């Protein structure tokens, strides 16, 4: 079996400016933050970021890496709004393709299933269709005379055709992984990570700890916790603390004090510069060292 | 009849609880402290089959006090976000969302104030509001009723109101059901011929003309509009002694 171990820098090396990048996790939970920092310190620009948005979106916007964000929300959970995202949007610096959370899910699912769209009621009647003028409706081909019409009220019904959200690359962070690229999620919610990977051309997993092939199924945890199978991954990198400061139980919870500092750094350019010098445009070793200093 | 001992926040809690009266075995999804207390109070009393989540990725047994530690919760089944859409799109849910803006037709905004391309104020985002509002019963909680929150037309339609659903056709109206709006001043519904907002009850201590003045559109006020009901002694006891002994409810709505 091929050994898919690699590094975050090698993963990032495959990206190009203008690409569409999917980021797993949800809000300020289990985000591949080491990858996000690596993108921030790269010379990549004009990215389209597709995410259930948290500080990944805020950081990338603050670092000027983003042209467009596809999302249903951006939140830090314990802090309702990400001030970096808010500042970028209010200045008109970043375009938003804002869709319903469920439409977003179907967009990833459509890409993963290689169909151009999936139908849904979600979005009908809302301004999601006004602010995204390219979204289209689809009329059900099953009319009143069709033997396949399950519900007469749905004859010829018009629904939203949520387009596939195809990704050039996707990144997720798991609690454990093996060398073959299977990923184990010990947190209570696998979110939509497998769909991000399924929707992407290049698929990358960062993880707290890499174990040998077959060692994830050692009887300690149900096999179902291995949410990501290796057909969905091209590379895996061990990054302890790689989701910091977002929540990644059972390995660690959200670093609320740090998140507050991150949010406060949006106050003015000087505080952002100071924060970025210390915690963003740094290597992973420097990041961990600065966190240790901070804890003292 | 006003019981001077019952606080405004407590009237709001029972008004929220009543939204789930008769709901049966569905998921109650409350946003905000007072709707959360309302859902738990409903489950403890007249709606015992309600299904509540632990706020993370599971359904929980019973209706524990607000602010209970995660380690104290008893879980009965997993409910990751991906499964939430199975619930939403099957209709087995009644959500009570918050609204930064709500309008006469029941449209709700949590996305942005001002133009969407460069908002004056960026809010959290549409979240699941578009899909929720056309798939299952939806209510709203507005803790700060004013002409800034109750507006003629919301800037971005997230949760879909009656006229917009009608315009969008059968796909939108089939399961569309905006039930009620609870604010710190009163309770509102859409039981009017043209499905626009009506004052259903005013909280004791609030005058109807105050509500009209704090509303940025023409509100239907029935001649016989009544006060919001009192909590029963059992409800009051549960709320004060069991569900919210620390009075977190008073932080969301002051008396």
Image (cartoon, grey):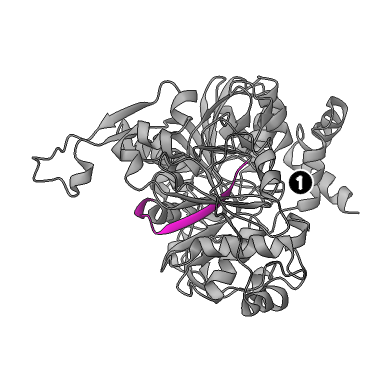
> Which residue is pictured at 77% across the width and 71% down the height?
B5
Q: Is residue B11 above or below residue B122?
A: below
Q: Is A56 a magenta residue?
A: no
User: Which residue occupies the foreground of this view, A284 or A104?
Assistant: A104
User: Which region shows up in magenta?
Assistant: B89-99
Can you name the residue that lies furthest to the front here? Answer: B223
> Which residue is pictured at 51% across the width and 60% down the height?
B19
The tally of labels here is 1
Q: Is residue A258 left or right of residue A41?
A: right
Instruction: Give the image quarter of residue A44.
Output: top right
Q: Residues within 10 Å of mark 1 (few under 14, many from 20)?
A: many
Per the image, the residue denoted by label 1 is A259
**Picture coordinates of residue A129, whole percent (x, y):** 43, 28
Q: Is residue A290 left or right of residue B214?
A: right
User: Which residue occupies the foreground of this view, A253 or A224?
Assistant: A253
Q: Secondary structure at mark 1?
A: helix
């Amino acid at each position: 079996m091929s050994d898919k171990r690699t590094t975050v820098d090698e993963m990032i090396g495959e990206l190009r400016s203008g690409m569409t990048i999917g980021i797993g996790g949800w809000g300020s939970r289990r985000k591949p933050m080491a990858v996000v920092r690596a993108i921030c310190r790269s010379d990549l620009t004009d990215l389209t970021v597709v995410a259930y948005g948290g500080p990944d979106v805020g950081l990338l916007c603050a670092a000027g890496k983003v042209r467009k964000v596809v999302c249903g929300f951006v939140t830090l959970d314990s802090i309702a709004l990400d001030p970096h995202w808010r500042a970028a949007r209010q200045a008109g610096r970043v375009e938003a393709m804002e869709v319903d959370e469920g439409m977003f899910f179907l967009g990833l699912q459509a890409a993963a299933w290689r169909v151009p769209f999936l139908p849904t009621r979600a979005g009908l009647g809302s301004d999601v269709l006004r602010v995204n003028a390219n979204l289209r409706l689809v009329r059900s081909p099953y009319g009143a005379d069709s033997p396949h019409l399950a519900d007469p009220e749905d004859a010829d019904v018009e629904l939203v055709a949520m387009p596939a959200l195809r990704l050039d690359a996707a990144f997720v962070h798991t609690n454990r992984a093996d060398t073959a690229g299977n990923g184990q999620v010990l947190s209570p919610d696998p979110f939509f990570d497998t769909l991000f990977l399924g929707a992407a051309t290049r698929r990358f997993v960062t993880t707290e700890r890499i174990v040998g092939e077959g060692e994830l199924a050692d009887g300690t945890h149900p096999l179902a916790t291995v949410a990501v199978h290796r057909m969905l991954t091209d590379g895996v990198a061990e990054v302890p603390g790689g989701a910091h400061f977002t929540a990644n139980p059972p390995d660690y919870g959200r670093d609320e004090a740090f998140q507050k500092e991150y949010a406060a750094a949006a106050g003015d350019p000087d505080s952002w510069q100071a924060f970025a010098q210390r915690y963003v445009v740094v290597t992973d070793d420097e990041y961990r060292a600065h966190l240790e200093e901070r804890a003292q | 009849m006003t019981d001077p001992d019952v606080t405004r926040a407590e009237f709001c809690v029972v008004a929220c609880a009543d939204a789930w009266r008769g709901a049966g075995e569905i998921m109650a999804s409350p946003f905000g402290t007072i709707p959360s207390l309302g859902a738990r109070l409903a489950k403890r009393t007249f709606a015992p089959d309600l299904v509540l989540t632990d706020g993370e990725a599971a359904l929980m047994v019973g209706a524990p006090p607000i602010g209970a530690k995660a380690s104290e919760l008893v879980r009965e089944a997993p409910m990751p976000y991906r499964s939430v859409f199975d619930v939403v799109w099957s209709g087995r849910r009644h959500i009570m969302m918050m609204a930064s803006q709500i309008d006469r037709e029941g449209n709700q905004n949590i996305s942005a104030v001002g133009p969407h391309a460069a908002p004056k104020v960026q809010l959290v985002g549409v979240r699941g509001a578009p899909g929720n509002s056309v798939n299952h019963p939806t209510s709203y909680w507005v803790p700060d009723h004013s002409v800034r929150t109750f507006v003629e037309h919301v800037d971005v339609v997230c949760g879909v109101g009656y006229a917009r659903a009608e315009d969008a056709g059968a796909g939108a109206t089939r399961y569309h059901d905006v039930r009620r709006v609870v604010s710190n001043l009163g309770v509102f519904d859409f039981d009017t011929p043209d499905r626009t907002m009506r004052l259903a009850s005013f909280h004791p201590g609030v005058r109807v003309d105050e509500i009209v003045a704090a509303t940025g559109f023409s509100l239907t006020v029935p001649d016989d509009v009544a006060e919001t009901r009192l909590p029963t002694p059992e409800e009051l006891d549960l709320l004060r002694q069991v569900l919210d002994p620390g009075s977190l409810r008073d932080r969301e709505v002051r008396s």
